Image (cartoon, helix red, strand yellow):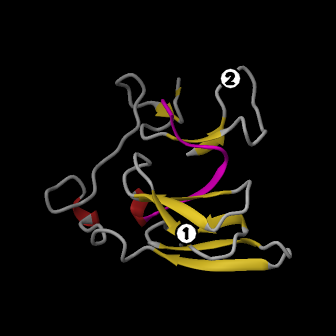
Amino acid sequence: MGVGNVGYRLEQSPNAVSTWISTNGGQTFQEILKGSHIYEIGDHGSLILVADDQNETNELRFSWNFGLSWETYKFSEDKIHVENISTDPSNKGRIFNLYGHNINNRGILYIIDLSKLHEPKCTGIDYVGSDASDFEWFTPAYENDNSCLLGQKIQ
């Protein structure tokens, strides 16, 4: 995932950028949301959270299908400026920390628990690729060649 623009030069103004995702190791990117968003990935990569990081908000969006569709979650009645979203370092969980500051510049922390909003947790990590597993193998490739990194062919 990344925030940026398409054009001849890098634009940094909030109106010129969008939030993008790649599902093929960076070969191609799809625009998933207009504007700049802070994001975090959890549940072994199956859950993505995003929040507007340019404007005050009291909502975040989450996707269970690599950004093809989004659901909205209102985390507070009051709007805050979101600074970051984090989860456990292994990115296995469905519980996230969302922090930022309010209009009085006081730090705010929300614990966002999405564990009950979707299907059961993925199973079968020891049997990747089998019928007993919810996981699949993924190897990024460049034009049918397995020597790519972030969309750039490795010589």
Disc 2 residue type (three-letter):
Gly
Q: Which residue is mark 1?
A: 89
Disc 1 residue type (three-letter):
Pro
Q: At x 49% / y 68%, what residue is drawn? A: 90
Q: On the rendered structure, is 9 left or right of 155?
A: right
Whether residue 132 is situated above or below residue 150 in the rendered picture:
below
Report x, y in % for residue 139: 37, 41
Q: Nearer the viewer, residue 25 or 103?
A: 103
Report x, y in % for residue 69: 40, 50
Give the total number of marks visible in the rendering. Answer: 2
Q: Which residue is mark 2?
A: 7
Of the two numbered discs 1 and 2 in the rendering, the one whose residue sits closer to the viewer: 2
In the rendered image, which quarter is residue 33 located in?
top right
Q: At x 40% / y 62%, what residue is drawn? A: 44
Q: Which residues are magenta?
A: 27-42
Q: Nearer the viewer, residue 27 or 79?
A: 79
Determine contact: label 1, label 2, CB under 8 Å: no
| Marks 1 and 2, how far apart at CA | 34 Å
Inspect the magenta stretch and tell me whether residue 137 lies in it.
Answer: no
Q: On the rendered structure, is 120 left or right of 142?
A: left
Q: Residue furthest front?
A: 77
* Main SS category, magenta section: strand
Q: At x 78% / y 78%, what residue is drawn? A: 107
Marking on residue 76: none
Inspect the magenta stretch and tell me whether residue 37 lies in it.
Answer: yes
Report x, y in % for residue 77: 63, 76
Q: Residue furthest right?
A: 104
Q: Disc 1 on helix, strand or loop?
A: loop
Whether residue 129 is situated above or below residue 142 in the rendered picture:
below
Report x, y in % for residue 14: 74, 43
Q: Is residue 78 visible?
A: yes
